[in-house]
Image (spheres, helix red, strand yellow):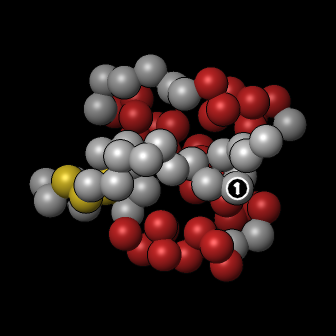
Amino acid sequence: MATALDSPCLGVCVIDARTDTCFGCFRTPKEIARWPRWGEEERRETLKKLKQRRKDAGLPPLPFYEEIEDQ
């Protein structure tokens, strides 16, 4: 089963020109491009940022973000 560490992609791959983040996963284009080369630590740190970006946008955290923090 795929996890957020594999990819936090939600299949809504559209970059918001205002925020320079994806409407689905909230990653920047640079984060999306670098994700495959990052190790677990970089991915976990980015997931924390994504959780905060969702919160700042007034959206609830996704369940897999909670799972990541519990590990």
- Tell me what residue is drawn at x 59 percent, y 69 percent: 35
Q: Amino acid at mark 1?
A: Asp
- Tell me what residue is drawn at x 75 percent, y 30 percent: 67
Q: Is 48 left, or right, of 12 in this rendering?
A: right
**The quadrant where residue 71 appears:** top right
Residue 5: give x, y in percent of width and height: 71, 52
Residue 18: give x, y in percent of width and height: 13, 54
Residue 19 vertical position relative to residue 42 in the rendered view, above or below = above
Q: Is 21 left, or right, of 4 in this rendering?
A: left
Which element type, helix, strand or loop, lies under badge 1? loop
Residue 41: give x, y in percent of width and height: 76, 61
Q: Is 37 left, or right, of 50 in this rendering?
A: right
User: What is the crowding at mark 1: few (fewer than 14 residues within 10 Å), some, or many (at least 20)?
Assistant: few
Residue 54 vertical position relative to residue 18 in the rendered view, above or below = above
- Tell me what residue is drawn at x 54 percent, y 28 percent: 62
Residue 2 vertical position relative to residue 20 in the rendered view, above or below = above
Is residue 25 at least partly visible in the picture?
A: no
Between 39 and 52, the one lying in front of the other is 39
Q: Is 37 left, or right, of 13 in this rendering?
A: right
**Quarter occupied by the N terminus:** top right
- Tell me what residue is drawn at x 38 percent, y 63 percent: 28
How many numbered dots are placed on residues in this image?
A: 1
The residue where tag 1 is placed is: 6
Between 44 and 34, the one lying in front of the other is 34
Is residue 67 at least partly visible in the picture?
A: yes
**The quadrant where residue 27 appears:** bottom left
